[in-house]
Amino acid sequence: MIGIFDMFNGRMLSLMSSFIDDKEKFQNDLSQMICQIRDCFLEFDVVDLLSMLGMKCYSLLKGGYYLDNEVCPEIVMEYAINFGLSVGDSKGKTPTLDVVNLLWQKLKNAIEYNSYLDLPLSNDEVSKDLLWQIHLNTINIRGEMYLVHLYEICEELVKFNSNNDLVINGEYKSFVDFLRKTYDDIVYQGSCKSFVVYTNDEFEQKILEDFSTNLGSNRNFMNGRFAGLFLNGFEYLDKPFIKYNAHYYLFSPLILKRNLLSLVSKRFNVSGKKRDAYVESKVLKLFERICPNVPFHSNVFYYDNGNRVETDIIGISDKYFYLIEVKASQQSLSNKVKFNGFVDRYKISVGDAVSQIVREEQYLNETESPIFYLQNNGSVCVKNKKLIKIIVTFQQYSMLMNDVDKIIEMGWVRKEYKDIWHISLGDLMVFADFCNDEDSLVSYIEMKQRVIDAKIQYCDELDVFGAFLDGKLENIIEENCIIGDNTDVFSERYESNSI
């Protein structure tokens, strides 16, 4: 089996080797790069720099003029904004194109070094592998679901939270329409020459005021244990508009899509309890779409040694009994950056779901007539059915699902996790669009189990599902091959709504 480190290109392996050979020199080199970048933002007009960098970013993105193994222009632009927001004033010299091109290259190089700065130098290869993957993905990976599904979740969540159609048809629609219009104006209508955001009324002006920050607001970016790290400060994620003088700027319009759920949740005061309840109801509806002939029930319970125990969702068909645990929590960026915080949250969320399913399975196996009680005061007795165990998380954990044995070895989850199908809500929404019968669902889950048992490498659940739809998964399993990108079928369907 090819390990994660074997899949990297020469540049990445060279940087990793440099870090391992001389960590102090590696850190000093990065510190020097950061100082040079900071000096550039202090010498030249910040707004002019960000505008010219933004134009370069979108010319590269729209033209596809960068290699897959290069740092994505969107990530470079995020790093530039971090530096820009750490400077308190925009006054400076007007930058030339040569200055901007050189700054762009320095930002790219610094991001590559950032990716390796927290590479653990432990002799424990399992720890090194997993923790560094989290760090690398946090810096370099953007977008956890297709945009069409993200808009669907946002609208349904606000409606669920307010229970008022007037909010959806009025304020919510106006809010999202403004974000869409702003994105289109900058990316497609040529406003990227200035990145200035224009408003038509007081409602839109209020949005800018509520979701804006100022130059100098990210001074913590140059503080902390290591000044100028990519992950030191992200104020602009929740406040993507930058106010300077009388204008509001949006130098990275993609943030409006990447962070849409957070912006919507903040604007409409979505509570954690409402989000949890919504996600569970959404998962129930998705499984009802996937298996229309199977009755599913949410908020059921059973009695274990006299104690009432809650179960999120069950499904009962002629052959199968489905146990589905749903976890709606999300990892914040700070938790992803701090290894221990991420691991603790993962254990609480996924680890708890595994323990719940283990207890439920034990109840089924050790009880002569296991009974589950339903919301409508009914009950079902489960006997002689094959058990299908599923965990659905709001958070995307594809970065870890490929390393089940390592996660278990590290003690993050119980060994029973290996026999559970774990899928994110975003991926489940794709699944519901392409799978609408129980036989296909069960067939895929069984083949995915074989992928895990064979320790076959893959990067994303949708790569595995795409191979299944194309009829290639059986051969891949038999030949024990790495599962590559098989998402064209999804990209074609969601092309106009991709994120």
Image (cartoon, rainbow, N blue to C red):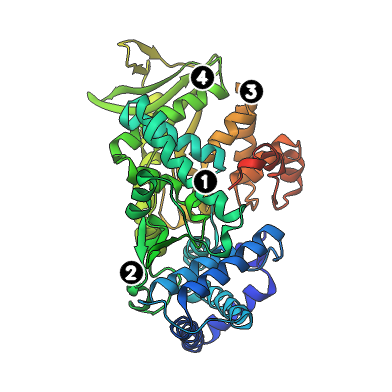
How far is disc 4 from disc 1 in space, using C-alphas? 52 Å
Q: Is residue 422 visible?
A: no
Q: Residue at x 67, y 61 (%)?
A: 2
Q: Which mark is residue 439?
A: 3
**Residue labelled with disc 4:** 385
In the rendered image, the quadrant that contains the N terminus is bottom right
* Residue 497, horizontal then vertical, whole percent: 61, 41
Q: Position of residue 60 (x, y in %)?
A: 67, 64
Side (left or right) of 452 relative to 407: right
Q: Are marks 4 and 1 in contact (CB under 8 Å)?
A: no
The kind of residue tagged 3 is: Asp
- Of labels 3 and 1, earlier in sequence is 1
Name which of mark 2 and mark 1 comes first in the sequence. 1
| Residue type, numbered disc 1 | Lys
Residue 56 picture quarter: bottom right
The 10 Å Cα crowd at callout 3, few under 14, some 14 to 19, many 20 or more, is few
